[in-house]
Each structure stands twice: as structure tokens, then as C-alpha cells.
Amino acid sequence: MSSAASTTLAPGRRLGSRIGDLLLYGITGAAAIGAVALLVAIAIKVIDGSRLAYDKFGLGFVTDQVWDPVKNQFGALAFIYGTAITSFFTLLIATPLAVAIALYLTELAPRGARDIIGSLVEMLAAVPSVILGLWGILVLGPIVADHIEPFLHRWLGFLPLFQGSPSNSGYLPAVIVLTIMVVPIVASVSRELFLSVPPEMKEGAYALGMTRWEVVRGVILPHAGPGIAAAVILGLGRAIGEAIAVTQVIGNIVQIKTSLFAEGVTLGSQIAAQYQGATSNLQISALIYLGAIMLVFSLIVNVIAQLIVRRFDLQRAGGVQ
């Protein structure tokens, strides 16, 4: 039998392949369109719900700090500040911890312990946020007030971030709780990225006499850089959007303070705390306006993530796209 004859498909099989291709294109295309449509529908609903507050306060809502339901005066500045400061310090702590955990599990941990420790780290991501919030109230809060904040005030009290009276609730407990929630996400993704580094690249580096640290710094981290950046942005999205756990530990005081010991509020915590008990349509619209701001934050974060990934890709390709 000739090669041409052997590669010719039977008519029935050819028809079945075409139907399979059409189904594949249809299902995957519908899933993609459905995801986009869902995002658009959510954005439209949020924008429509915030229209009453936007018509009354305009963009000044973003720069106004007052939040007074009795006088129908609402502003988002304190919530934006709280979201920004908790998210920033969460990533500042969580990123090196998560990358270190991923490196330990892929490069240093004994083979028998890798799966066990990795599974336990990933299980942190499955803990309900309300449980973490309760743990933050019952366990973390007293530890922070009695030990962590006094220690930080004693040694770093000359900095505005560590001034003030220790408290069971505030920005610092919220940052710690968010860090616990973000670390397993970034660590799990980073671990898979490190495992995807081609073994021949590491073996070649070791053959050239590089130490383990030099291999990590010069081979593993550069190869996984874009993915780590994307994982960090994913963790940032979790930190920005978290509401329940933060509501339980941050104190929910509408104010702007530079100290991490102070009580505060975030966009998500304010929505979670007040939406069910809102007393007017304007207050409900103002809360939805906060949600619209969170959507904008998410869009900006994702755009930044794409730019970071593309920059890493360009550097890897030698600056040629």
C-alpha cells in the first residue's frame, strides 16, 4: 500500500473529524465568549448601580474622605487608602515567603517531604476566609497586641508606620491574615514554574561550576520570572478583593492613619459590613460605587501584569519581539 493511500482517511472518519473540529471550535469559542459576556454583564450592572452616587458626587467621590450615612455624605478615599496599604504590605511580605517556599520544595526539601509539605501549603488556600477571620480575632489579635506591635514599636517606633498604641485589630492584623491567604496561591504557582525549568539548563549550569545559589539566581528565577510576576498579580487580586476576613480584623474605622497599628477599613470590608444594613438608596449606590472602583483596580492590575510579562518575554528574546 502506498504512503498516499495509507494517509487517506475513510469518508466516515473524515466526516467525524470535521464534526469533532466544529464541536471543538464551537464549545471553546462559546466558553470564551461566555466569559467575556459575563465580565461585561457584571461591569454594566455595577456601573448602573453606582449611577445614583456618581450623579451626586462625581469623581469627587474618590477624593472625599467623609462617610456619613445620616447626612448622605459619602467618599471613598479612606477605603482606597486602606486597600492600597494592606495590599502593598501583604505583597511585600508574601512574595519573598512564597518564592522561598517554592524554591525549598523544588530544590532543597527531601524528596519524601516535598509532597507532604506542598499539600499542606496548598491546603491553606482552601481554608474559608471567615475561619481565618475568626482565627485572626481569637488568636492573632492578642498576639499582635501583646507581642508583635510592642516589639515593632520598641525597635522601629521612630518610623510613622510603627507608632501608636498596640491594638487587637487594625492594618497589621489585616496584613498578616491577607498574607496567609496570598502565600499559598503564589507559592503553588511558583512551584509549578520552578518544576518546569528544563533540567538540562540546571545541569549545564552545575557543570560550569555554578553553586546552587548561582543556579537559582541565574537560571531558575530568570526562566520563571514572567510566571512569578503573574502569580504575584494573582495574589494582589486576592488581597484587593478579600472582604470577610479583613472585615473581622481591621477594625472598620473610617480614617486615614499612617501607622499600621491603627484601625482602618478597605473597599471590600466596607461593602461587606454595610451593604445589608444600608438605610438609603444613595448609600447602596455609594457602596456599589466602591465596587466599581475595585473593578477599575482589577483592570489596572491586570494591565500591569500583562506589561510585566511582555517585558520579561522581550528581555528573554533579546529585545526582539
Image (tube, grey):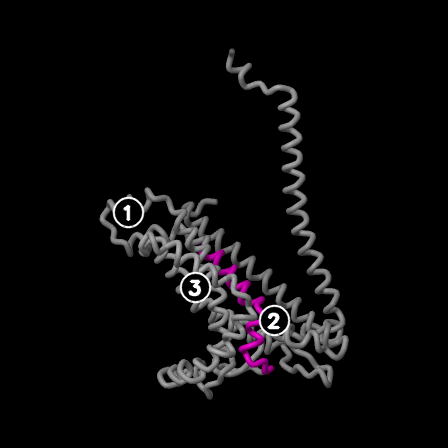
Q: Which residue is mark 3?
A: 95
Disc sitting over residue 205 in the figure:
1
**Residue 158 in view (yes/no):** no
The foreground one among 124 and 186 is: 124
Q: Residue furthest left?
A: 209
**In magenta stretch: residue 211:** no
Q: Quadrant of residue 43?
A: bottom right
Decide whether the magenta segment is chiefly helix, strand or loop.
helix
The foreground one among 262 and 27 is: 27
Disc sitting over residue 314 in the figure:
none
| Amino acid type indicated by mark 3 | Thr
Residue 290 location in percent, x, y? 65, 71
Q: Residues within 10 Å of mark 1 (few under 14, many from 20)?
A: some
Q: Secondary structure at mark 2?
A: helix
Q: In the rendered view, does 42 fall on the left or right side of 182?
A: right
At horizontal 54% and vertical 73% (from top left) the residue drawn is 133
At horizontal 52% and vertical 65% (from top left) the residue drawn is 127
| Amino acid type indicated by mark 1 | Ala
Q: Is residue 236 above or below residue 169?
A: above
Q: Residues within 10 Å of mark 3 (few under 14, many from 20)?
A: many
Depth-wise, is mark 1 or mark 2 nearer the camera? Answer: 2
At horizontal 54% and vertical 19% (from top left) the residue drawn is 7
Disc sitting over residue 268 in the figure:
2
Q: Earlier in the sequence, mark 1 or mark 3?
A: 3
